[in-house]
Image (spheres, grey):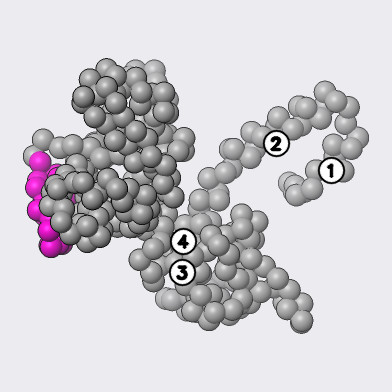
Amino acid sequence: MGSSLDDSSITGVMNKEEKEEFVGQIEIWKYMLCFTDSFALKCAVELRIADIIDRYGKPLSLSQIAANIEDAPSPEVSMLQRILTVMVRRKIFSAEKSESGETLYGMTHASKWILRDTKMTLAPLVLLENHPIHLNPAHYISDCVREGYKNGTPFFRCHGHDQFELTGVDADFNRLFNEGQVCTARIVSKAVISGYKDGFKQIESLVDVGGGIGGSLFEIVRAYPHIKGINFDLPHVVATAPKYDGITHVGDPEGNEPFTDAGIAFDMLLLAHNAGGKERTAENWKILFKDAGFARYNIIKINAMPSIIEAFPI
């Protein structure tokens, strides 16, 4: 069975009711298969396609990219082309024709964020979020809707451990998780440092609860060395944390789950991975602060997905 990428010839002969039904069907197909974008993106990161193009500093042909893939003695070029077709359609890479008619693939504003050989990258997070350990719990969400969390979160039902417990018993997952968190921390910290200058100047000590291996806190303390930093997380997490000037690592045996703010899509991840974490709107935060006894608060927008929130008890 084949399918056309252009449905105009089909809808042109439909009446209004048929067209609406067809459009509805297309919407379901689109969301049913949207995971393929993530798979293609993961392949691009694993194959270091962006790094290959960036290293040459110019658009490359399919054969040039294939020839530079590491540990690939006999690359399947046709598969690579199909992956790049998806990535070009999603504007992760560009495509242009050479004088000889050969397609050349180049970088875009998005490509730089999947470079592996740089600090400011989202590549480790792409690998984390597309790992089976993170993807498989989604198959248990409907069970939790029916039964609640009495038999555990979707993550627990899938793996037999909560997410942060698993980082303590699976060294490979712990490394993957920490690398994903560190890359995010670098990006967000840069925006936080720039967007909260007046606030940091007034702070003498700063505790990062669920701070992982301390990457975010280190960036803040490095920019504002008068601040005494305390990085607070699970013992097995801080055990792998590097030593930073001005930062004390504290392991909490009870556990305090860190959670991230990154939009509605991440709310589904929180739903699958954690019992308590969820995304909140400004109105949700207002209710939460009021119930917790914080009479005043500020939500400060920065050049990143999360925001800075100040809460004052009086």
Comparing marks 4 and 2, which lies closer to the viewer?
Answer: 4
Q: Which residue is mark 2?
A: 26
Q: Residues within 10 Å of mark 3 (few under 14, many from 20)?
A: many
Q: Earlier in the sequence, mark 2 or mark 1?
A: 1
Q: Earlier in the sequence, mark 4 or mark 3?
A: 3
Label 2, label 1: how far apart the Cα atoms are: 13 Å
Tell me the number on the disc at residue 8: 1
Q: Which residues are magenta?
A: 232-252
Q: Earlier in the sequence, mark 1 or mark 3?
A: 1
Q: Earlier in the sequence, mark 1 or mark 4?
A: 1
Q: Is residue 9 left or right of residue 45?
A: right
> Residue 218's quadrant in the figure?
bottom left
In front: 304, or 168?
Answer: 304
Tell me the number on the disc at residue 48: 3
Residue occupying the point 57% across, 60% down: 92
Q: Is residue 201 left or right of residue 85?
A: left
Q: Is residue 92 left or right of residue 173?
A: right
In front: 272, or 279?
Answer: 279
Query: Tag 3: residue type?
Result: Arg
Residue 192 spot, x, y in % from top left: 34, 50
Q: Determine if residue 236 is in view.
A: no
Query: Tag 2: residue type?
Result: Ile
